[in-house]
Image: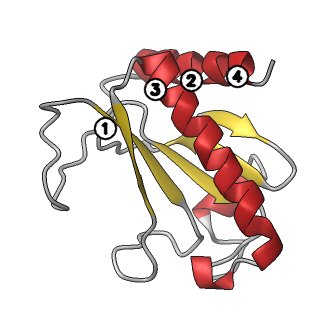
Amino acid sequence: MSTKDCIFCKIIRRESEGYIVFEDDISLSFLDIRPLNPGHCLLVPKDHYETIMDLPEDLIGPLFKNAKLISKAIEMGLSAQGIFIGINNKISQSVPHLHIHIVPRNKNDNLKGFFWPRYPYKDRETILDIQNRIKSAIDLLLI
């Protein structure tokens, strides 16, 4: 897949809508539009790398530092009890652009095993509210 056709690259270039919660020089994080739980975010490197094995060594630390920040923000902004972090490489990777799933978890949230149903947000207002709550928490954490 070329970066021209990659949906995540299009979101990074602002050619497709993405509900962005965080951006820095190396990465971008946005809400998954088919979340496992509301607030499920994807963190992607801005440069196109298909899998974690393709990611340059010098980006691993900064990318996971951002995953930690977003995890804290999701817990804080959404009052989540915990976080699930996952990366698919090739198998079950619906978009061939490295992305880290950061999913809010709460007891009895019905996520069991790895066969989790996905549910789209009920409306734009809901997704914008969750986006703003996570962004506000990130702002507080960066102070």
Instruction: Find the distance from the CA under tag 3 to the CA under tag 2.
Output: 9 Å
Q: CA distance from mark 2 to mark 4?
A: 11 Å
Q: Secondary structure at mark 3?
A: helix
**Residue drawn at the location 17% of the way across and 45% of the way down:** 111
Q: CA distance from mark 1 to mark 3?
A: 20 Å
Q: Are marks 1 and 4 in contact (CB under 8 Å)?
A: no
Mark 1 and mark 2: span between their CA atoms?
A: 18 Å
Q: Secondary structure at mark 2?
A: helix
Q: Which residue is mark 3?
A: 75
Question: Which quadrant does the N terminus fall into?
Answer: bottom right
Residue type at numbered disc 1: Pro
Location of residue 143 by image quarter = top right
The residue wearing badge 1 is: 120
Identify residue for label 2: 134
Image depth: mark 1 or mark 2 in front: 2
Q: Amino acid at mark 2?
A: Ile
In the rendered view, tell whether residue 93 sits above or below residue 128: below
Q: Residue at x 65, y 55 (%)?
A: 64
Query: Is residue 6 or residue 137 the one in the foreground?
Result: 137
Please report whichever mark, 1 or 2, sits nearer to the chain's N-terminal start: 1
